[in-house]
Image (spheres, rainbow, N blue to C red):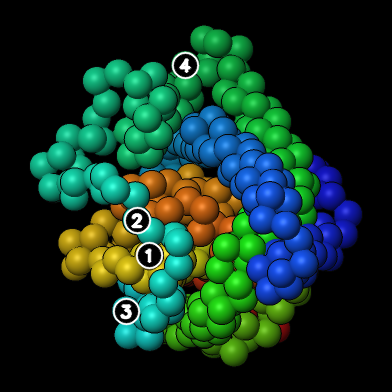
Amino acid sequence: MIDTPKNLTRNILLGMLLGFVVGAIFYYLEIFPQGIKNFVSIYIFNLGGSIFINLLKMLIIPLVFFSLVSGISSLTSMKSLGNITAKTIGLYLATTAIAVSLSLTIASIFKPGSGYSSDIAPPDNLPEGQGIYETILAIFPSNILEAMAQNQMLAVVFFSILFGIALNKTNHLTGNFSTAFEKLNTVFMQLVIMIISFAPIGVFCLIGKFVITDGLDIFQEAFKYVILLISVLIIHVFLTYSLILKAFTNLDIFTFYKKMKEVAIFAFSTSSSAATIPVTLKTVQNDLGVDKNVSSFVVPVGATINMDGTAIMQGMATVFIAQMSGIDLTLIQYVQVVILAVVTSIGTAAVPSAGTITLVIILQQFGLPLEAIGIILAVDRILDMIRTSVNVTGDAAVACIVADSERLLDKEVFNK
Ligand code: ASP
């Protein structure tokens, strides 16, 4: 298993605090000459923050590619379980779409980030809104390298899926070449961890930059973002999952939540759905009574592609940043956020903070200022823990529904 850096949460919090303090000293106390203030602002905060953002962006395309290819190549290997595959993917997509729609609904009512205007102005040349025609056409790249170079997510996802299927179909001719991609995926997860371990410094610079230019007012709005986000995560876990479990099975909801406690705590403390896979598998099989044939497929695939909590964060963060930049998203753009959040949450690696990396794709799509990721990252540690618990609970709920529909759920075990 990949090691996450020790004390990362604590260090990021410290970096954030230090960014506040140093930024505030320069902003509020006029004891330093303007030249020094400019130097700190440009060569420390700005440069450091931009380097960190570049490092995050650097990972996006290869990460999405390897994570999807390795996911898909193991997925299609279960040809005999075509039914289970279809149900699983259908439910995963549906729950994620519900999750982000819920998030956008609440965000559009409470408007986190509104009433604050800062230097985070929208760039001059906002990209033209894409019509349905262009959006559909953009799924099918004429040149995959160009699509990758331009961060065209839908095209990269499409190609990765095709590639994953082809990889699987040729495994017997290539000496199980798909395992090479699983290994590369592991390597990229490690890269994410390596870059995330610089998060304390990155967050220090990004926060410092905000405070040195804008003072501290901004964080009142971030507080609203945090509270709203946690509320939506809680609503989704307890309302949406209860409703779909009730709709598709006659299992006892309370038993489900009671037995999921350990998985949720583990996900909370590791902030990684991938690291939680062993615990999720154990609980789903031994405590919830899901047959091994279903769980061994549904749980790992879910950890890779099903991230309702992440999609909720991405929806809320997009509205938050748009509001902060004085942009009101249109209805069409809301629909685009839903589609993008479903797609990017699929492409998000199941490791700490990965959701904030793929959030960049959505922000870019709407021409929203990437610097605002600093505010998101500053408050992200605790949110990452909570949304990872949501992600794994979703995986288990879908495992129960699929198993029950295939009569592969042992109710005696479930009710024990
Ligand atoms: N940490 C999350 C997970 O592993 C991904 C994310 O949203 O950052 O499920």
Q: Alpha carbon of mark 3 to alpha carbon of mark 4: how far?
A: 47 Å
Q: Amino acid at mark 1?
A: Ser
Depth order, front residue of 316/76? 316
Q: Amino acid at mark 4?
A: Thr
Residue 320 in view? yes
Question: Reading the chain from its start, which is encountered first: label 2 or label 4?
Answer: 2
Q: Nearer the viewer, mark 3 or mark 4?
A: 3
Instruction: Categorize mark 4 by other alpha carbons within 10 Å: few (<14), some (14-19), many (20+).
Output: few
Q: Residue at x 78, y 47 (%)?
A: 197
Q: Secondary structure at mark 4?
A: loop
Farthest residue, direction right? 6
Q: Which residue is mark 2?
A: 122
Q: Nearer the viewer, mark 2 or mark 4?
A: 2
Question: Reading the chain from its start, which is encountered first: label 3 or label 4?
Answer: 3
Q: Which residue is mark 3?
A: 108
Q: Alpha carbon of mark 3 to alpha carbon of mark 1: how far?
A: 15 Å
Q: Which residue is mark 1?
A: 325
Measured from the top left, where is residue 357 in percent x and y?
A: 55, 48
